């Protein structure tokens, strides 16, 4: 059984990475297209652009509380960047933040 992590809202994933944008992302969230930088050449696997979340600040959709303003319709790449993943832990390490610890499953305690 794999460990479960809970996002603590540090926002580093939305500050340090390029977010690949695919056509399906634009269908699900048209505002992404308004902020997307197109690629000069066709990308891999249908990539049509990117959001530069590390080129001058934070992702355009990160709110003042370090939460995603388009969370239900965020790009696929963001969905594949879960709290506690290797990528998550790496951006936290780069930012000088402590690594996320797995959540304690209180439903399995004998108390």
Image (spheres, helix red, strand yellow):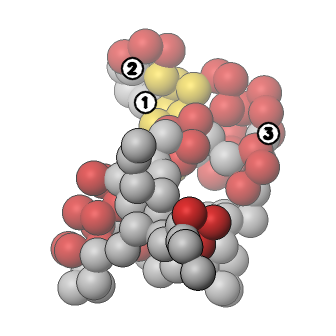
**Rendered residue at 64%/22% (across/down):** 23
Q: Of label 1 and label 3, which has the lower sequence position?
A: 3
- Asked if residue 86 lies left or right of residue 74, the reply is left
Dot 3 surroundings within 10 Å: few (below 14), some, or many (20 or more)?
A: few
Dot 2 surroundings within 10 Å: few (below 14), some, or many (20 or more)?
A: some
- Asked if residue 19 lies left or right of residue 26, the reply is left
Residue of label 2: 43
> What's the CA distance linking mark 2 and mark 3?
19 Å
For the residues carrying marks 1 and 3, which lies nearer the camera in this image?
3
Q: Quadrant of residue 64?
A: bottom right
Instruction: Check if mark 1's residue and mark 2's residue have beta carbons within 8 Å.
Output: yes
Q: Is residue 17 above or below residue 109?
A: above
Q: Disc number at residue 48? A: none
Q: Which image quadrant: the N terminus?
A: top left
- The answer to whether residue 41 is seen in the rendering is yes
Residue nearer the viewer, 70 or 47: 70
Q: Of label 2 and label 3, which has the lower sequence position?
A: 3
- Asked if residue 69 lies left or right of residue 93, the reply is right
**Residue 9: image x %, image y %?**
55, 78
- Looking at the rendered structure, the secondary structure element under dot 3 is helix
Residue of label 1: 39
**Rendered residue at 27%/84% (across/down):** 98
Residue nearer the viewer, 28 or 55: 28
**Residue 53: image x %, image y %?**
45, 60
**Rendered residue at 30%/53% (across/down):** 87
- Looking at the rendered structure, the secondary structure element under dot 1 is loop
Q: Is residue 6 above or below residue 31?
A: below
- Looking at the rendered structure, the secondary structure element under dot 2 is loop
Single out the residue that lies furthest toward the front: 110
**Rendered residue at 29%/64% (across/down):** 89
Residue of label 3: 30
């Amino acid at each position: 059984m794999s460990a479960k992590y809970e996002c603590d809202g540090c926002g580093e994933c939305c500050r340090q990475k390029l977010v690949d944008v695919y056509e399906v992302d634009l269908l699900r969230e048209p505002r992404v297209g308004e902020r997307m930088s197109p690629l000069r050449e066709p990308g891999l696997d249908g990539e049509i652009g990117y959001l530069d979340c590390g080129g001058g600040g934070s992702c355009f959709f990160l709110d003042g509380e370090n939460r995603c303003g388009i969370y239900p319709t965020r790009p696929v790449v963001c969905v594949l960047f879960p709290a506690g993943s290797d990528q998550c832990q790496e951006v936290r390490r780069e930012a000088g933040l402590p690594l996320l610890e797995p959540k304690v499953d209180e439903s399995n305690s004998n108390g």
